Image (spheres, coloured by chain):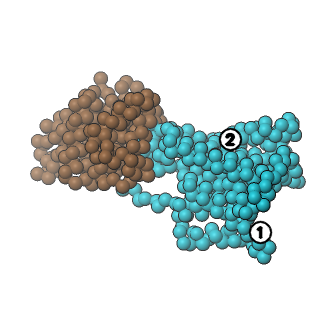
Chain colours: A cyan, B brown
């Protein structure tokens, strides 16, 4: 029971990060490998503002603002000039941005890990099992954010424009959509979700290093591909699935050491059996 | 004054020149058609006007305003839009959401609702399939949707790129009836077509495009009776 809850909440974290990968891929058709490092940016933002103000709630707000702003600035400075360039150039740039962010963090904070003390919400008993309140918070807030995002994309003018741009940039432009603005909004939303992921991650593992974002970033990317890159429900499903598998594997002592290899093997299996991912859309040939 | 004026337009794809200094104009209230064979540069011309393909030299003026370097989405806000070649409806959105996308530049929600109702009366099939995913419509129905979607923005100038392409004869007639109807309701039309006979039958004036240059122009009537046009495009 508590393993399942832990798995779901880790899954929510992966899903939040995976959404950033998948939305940016869907709309800008690029893999933003610097996305995982936004989590690290968010973590240091929480750390610094917590040290300065001592107010954890303010720190969360600061972290969300810093992450969103970094996402937008990175897109503007690093990716926008490459619009129309070959996908490989964009991909390499994204990897470069990832190294850049890690190096900057190392310059400012050093490479040693720093611990952070977030408020402890304690545990509650559900039936016989005790569950961390932070786990439940992660699940509930993660669920609310993902529902809100789904409604936003489906029901609002900007959300519809995002779907339109993701399908056909030229046709969206003919509707009067400012494609560059929509791409910017997408980066902003993705990075904001990463800020939440960062907070929930720190609630589970309260130590920060400049490479903190790499592993959850890669796992979440795996989740996005398993779910079907470009698909929003796919990213959510992939994230939750991967989180559950990870926690279940870790709870069985004999399997635990192989957890990460099992997760990535799952990716390989999915790519072999259903290359578009579980909920991926077939790419239609243009008539 | 011409509503749309294209002057000495040059368009390149890499090193290859696709459009060679063409000039033409569309006056308010007219139906003007560009006819020509496959690869003559008709679609390129249309796309370059909307900023989808960069213009090397020349100017495009709309309603007295130079729009040569204006981003495409801003051009739409000025009251001109295009039904692109191959329709390019949003396949994964519903018919209703496609129409809403067409109204992206309209801010009045009541107006949008009225327009959707009107489009659904004009194109009954769209009314019946409002909540269907657009990709599941037939080719003809998708063309109706593409035209309805463009009408949602209340264009003063509507450009249509090969609206009859790949449609059954029944739908071809329907498409041309709709264009005529819409023109009578006060919209200026620029029509690109391979089906020269049909296009000339509803147009006021026409230009013939051959390998990137305009080789002939005149009233639709003149071109319908021109021997060279008859031979090359009308199959007579």
**Is tag 2's residue or tag 1's residue first in the polypeptide sequence?**
2
Measured along the vertical axis of the image, is residue A242 above or below residue B111? below
- Label 1: which secondary element: helix
Residue under circle 1?
A251
Asked if marks 2 and 1 fall on the same chain, the answer is: yes
Q: Residue furthest bottom?
A: A254
Label 2 Cα crowd, 10 Å radius (few <14 / some 14-19 / many 20+): many
Identified at 33% across, 53% down, the residue is B137
Measured along the vertical axis of the image, is residue B206 above or below residue A193? above
Gap between marks 2 and 1, in whole Å? Answer: 35 Å
From the viewer's perspective, is the residue at label 2 or at label 1 nearer? Answer: 1
The quadrant of the rendering that contains the C terminus of chain A is bottom left
Residue B31, x across and y down, in percent: 24, 34
Whether residue A176 is visible: yes
Tell whether B229 sits left or right of A260. left
The quadrant of the rendering that contains the N terminus of chain A is bottom right
């Amino acid at each position: 029971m508590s393993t399942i809850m832990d798995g779901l909440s880790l899954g929510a974290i992966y899903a939040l990060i995976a959404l950033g990968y998948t939305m940016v891929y869907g709309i800008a058709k690029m893999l933003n490998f610097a996305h995982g490092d936004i989590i690290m940016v968010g973590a240091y933002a929480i750390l610094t503002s917590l040290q300065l103000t001592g107010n954890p709630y303010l720190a969360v707000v600061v972290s969300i603002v810093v992450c969103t702003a970094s996402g937008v600035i990175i897109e503007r400075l690093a990716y926008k000039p490459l619009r129309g360039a070959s996908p490989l150039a964009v991909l390499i740039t994204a990897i470069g941005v990832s190294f850049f962010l890690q190096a900057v963090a190392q310059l400012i904070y050093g490479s040693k890990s720093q611990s952070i003390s977030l408020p402890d919400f304690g545990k509650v008993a559900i039936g016989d099992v005790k569950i961390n309140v932070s786990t439940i918070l992660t699940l509930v807030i993660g669920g609310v954010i993902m529902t809100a995002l789904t409604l936003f994309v489906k029901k609002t003018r900007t959300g519809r424009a995002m779907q339109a741009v993701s399908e056909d940039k030229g046709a969206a432009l003919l509707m009067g959509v400012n494609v560059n603005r929509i791409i910017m909004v997408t980066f902003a939303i993705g990075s904001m979700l990463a800020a939440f992921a960062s907070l929930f991650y720190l609630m589970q593992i309260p130590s920060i290093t400049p490479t903190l974002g790499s592993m959850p970033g890669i796992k979440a990317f795996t989740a996005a591909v398993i779910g079907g890159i470009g698909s929003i429900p796919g990213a959510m499903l992939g994230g939750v699935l991967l989180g559950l598998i990870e926690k279940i594997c870790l709870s069985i002592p004999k399997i635990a050491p192989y957890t990460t290899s099992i997760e990535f093997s799952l990716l390989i299996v999915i790519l072999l059996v259903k290359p578009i991912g579980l909920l991926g859309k077939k790419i239609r040939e243009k008539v | 004054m011409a509503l749309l004026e294209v002057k000495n337009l040059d368009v390149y794809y890499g090193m290859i020149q696709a459009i060679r200094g063409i000039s033409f104009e569309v006056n308010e209230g007219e139906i003007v058609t560009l006819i020509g064979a496959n690869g003559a540069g008709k679609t390129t011309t249309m796309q370059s006007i909307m900023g989808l393909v960069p213009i090397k030299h020349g100017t495009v003026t709309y309603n007295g305003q130079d729009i040569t370097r204006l981003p495409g989405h801003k051009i739409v806000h000025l009251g001109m839009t295009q039904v692109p070649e191959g329709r390019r409806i949003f396949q994964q959105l519903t018919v209703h959401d496609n129409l809403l996308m067409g109204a992206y530049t309209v801010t009045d929600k009541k107006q949008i609702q009225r327009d959707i109702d009107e489009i659904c009366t004009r194109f009954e099939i769209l009314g019946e399939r409002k909540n269907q995913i657009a990709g599941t419509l037939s080719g003809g129905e998708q063309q109706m949707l593409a035209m309805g979607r463009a009408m949602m923005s209340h264009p003063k100038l509507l450009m249509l790129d090969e609206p009859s392409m790949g449609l059954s004869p029944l739908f071809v007639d329907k498409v041309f009836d709709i264009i005529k109807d819409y023109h009578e309701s006060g919209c200026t039309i620029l029509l690109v077509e391979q089906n020269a006979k049909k296009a000339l039958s509803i147009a006021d004036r026409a230009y013939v495009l051959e390998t990137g240059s305009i080789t002939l122009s005149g009233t639709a009537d003149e071109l319908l009776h021109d021997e060279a046009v008859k031979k090359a495009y009308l199959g007579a």
